[in-house]
Amino acid sequence: MPQDQLHVVEEIFPLNVNFCNTCTHLQLSHVVSAETLFREYVYVSGTSPVMVKHLKDYAKQAIQYTGITRGSLVFEFGSNDGTLLGHFKEMGYTVLGMDPAINLAHEATARGLPTIPDFFGAESAEKVAIEHGKARLICANHCCAHIDDLRGVIQGVSELLAPEGIWVFEVGYLLSVFQNNLFDTIYHEHVDFHSVAPIQKVCKCFGLKLLNAEMNYIQGGSLRCFVGWPNTCPQIKNGEENISELVRKEFAAGLNKAVTFHRWVRFHLSFRSA
């Protein structure tokens, strides 16, 4: 910290996690203003060669699953510095990003990756649909954990997603957090801790369907989900089997019960104090 800021009193926020007995979703109870956290952002995807390659593979898989033709609109919210969109642009697709970090949105736009400096939700999605048309592919890479209004996000997806479109998003996986004791991933930027079972439920509320879910090992263990319209979206081979197997593992670990997390926390607190 610069010397002239040493006198500044740091703000302190509660860090409590709530479990929903109905949908089994895990989420922070206290949400720090998104304006405070994300309007000026320092993390950029393009600085990590590992992440750059991961996102290139992500783009190739998304194209394979959707079968979108070149020139189709690929929209990404939480697009950061545009690294993922850059891969799509190189492969001949029309790209558009949205990110609340004004500095990153301006940087990406200057690099030829048009990015709207805004938060994604139903209202902003409707504006994009009016101005640019529906998107055959919507992406979101490790940003849904930062958003407390998940229903607003999924409503936005439903506003913008084309009839045969797919929404691909990747998030940190709660099963990995639990099994690998990743306590350092529980902090104020991460409002949500995602698992497959509650994702299925919330998508269904908006007429969408979870088509496939796959685990990978980026950032300590992540979950990549593919969502579309039940009657018009492309079918993904082994999608149902993959989803069922992950839900089975989640339930076997006890992620559908609040008592699991009570015991988990008590064990680690007692271990640290020993």
Image: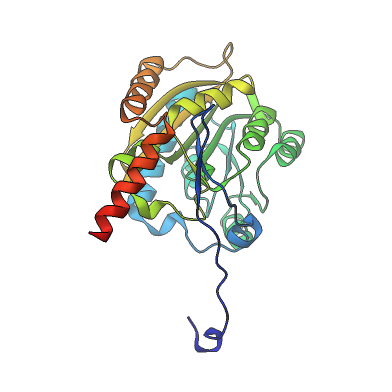
Residue 26, above or below 98: above
> Residue 41's image quarter?
bottom right
Taking the spot 40% from the left edge, 52% from the top edge, the residue there is: 185
Taking the spot 27% from the left edge, 60% from the top edge, the residue there is: 273
Q: Total marks drawn?
A: 0
Q: Where is residue 251 in the image (x, y as percent from the top left)?
A: 36, 25
Q: Which of 50 and 213 is in front in this view?
A: 213
Residue 163, above or below 56: above
Residue 112, above or below 144: below
Q: Position of residue 85 (x, y in %)?
A: 52, 44
Q: In which quarter of the image is the C terminus?
A: bottom left
Residue 14, above or below 242: below
> Residue 238's image quarter?
top left
Q: Nearer the viewer, residue 38 or 30?
A: 30
> Does 135 sit left or right of 258 as displayed?
right
What residue occupies the far left of the structure in this picture? 274
> Does 39 sit left or right of 133 as displayed?
left
What residue occupies the far top of the structure in this picture? 231
What residue occupies the far bottom of the structure in this picture? 4
> Does 173 sit left or right of 15 as displayed?
left
Taking the spot 41% from the left edge, 15% from the top edge, the residue there is: 240
Q: Nearer the viewer, residue 29 or 159?
A: 29
Residue 165 visible in this rendered orientation of the protein = no
Q: Position of residue 272 (x, y in %)?
A: 27, 58
> Residue 212's image quarter?
top left
Residue 87 visible in this rendered orientation of the protein = yes
Colour mode of the rendering: rainbow
Q: Where is residue 183 in the image (x, y as percent from the top left)?
A: 36, 52
Taking the spot 64% from the left edge, 24% from the top edge, the residue there is: 162
